Amino acid sequence: MVDYIKESWNELTNFVTWPTWAEAQRLTVIVAVFSVVLALLIWGIDTVFSGAIENYFEWIKS
């Protein structure tokens, strides 16, 4: 376990390329915008299907 932690720390400090602060902020905004757009898309699809299913059951109930 100790070797795993040492190797992980070595990997993080010597071989990982960290983004600049500006790049991290830009990518965070991109991810946030994409997440909101995807959530709205899923909400819209869910609303359409919910209405269709509701109408179907009203139709078969009559």
Image (cartoon, helix red, strand yellow):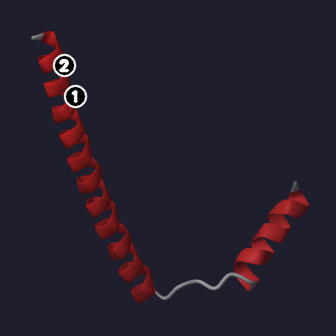
**Residue identifier under label 1:** 53
Relative to 27, 59 lies left or right:
left
Q: The C terminus lies in which quarter of the figure?
A: top left
Residue 42 x, y percent position in the rendering:
29, 49
Where is 54 relative to 60, above or below? below
Whole-percent x, y for residue 43 in the image? 24, 47
Q: Quadrant of the N terminus?
A: bottom right
Question: What residue is at 71 percent from the left and 76 percent from the top?
Answer: 12
Query: In this rendering, would 54 be left or right of 41?
Result: left
Quick one: 50 or 58, which is closer to the camera? Answer: 58
Q: Quadrant of residue 8?
A: bottom right
Q: Residue at x 14, y 26 (%)?
A: 55
The residue that appears at 14% across and 11% down in the rendered structure is 61
Amino acid carrying mark 1 in the image: Ile
Residue located at (64% from left, 85% from top) = 17
Mark 2 in CB contact with mark 1 (< 8 angstroms): yes
Residue type for callout 2: Phe
- Quick one: SS at disc 2? helix
Q: CA distance from mark 2 to mark 1?
A: 6 Å
Residue placed furthest toward the top: 61
Horizontal relation, residue 13 to residue 33: left or right: right
Q: Residues within 10 Å of mark 1 (few under 14, many from 20)?
A: few
Q: Give the x, y percent position of residue 19.
A: 53, 85
Secondary structure under badge 1? helix
Quarter-of-image position of residue 46: top left
Q: Position of residue 5 (x, y in %)?
A: 81, 62
What number is the disc on residue 16? none
Q: Which mark is residue 57?
A: 2
Q: Is residue 33 above or below residue 25?
A: above
Q: Is residue 52 left or right of residue 39?
A: left
Q: Nearer the viewer, residue 42 or 7?
A: 42
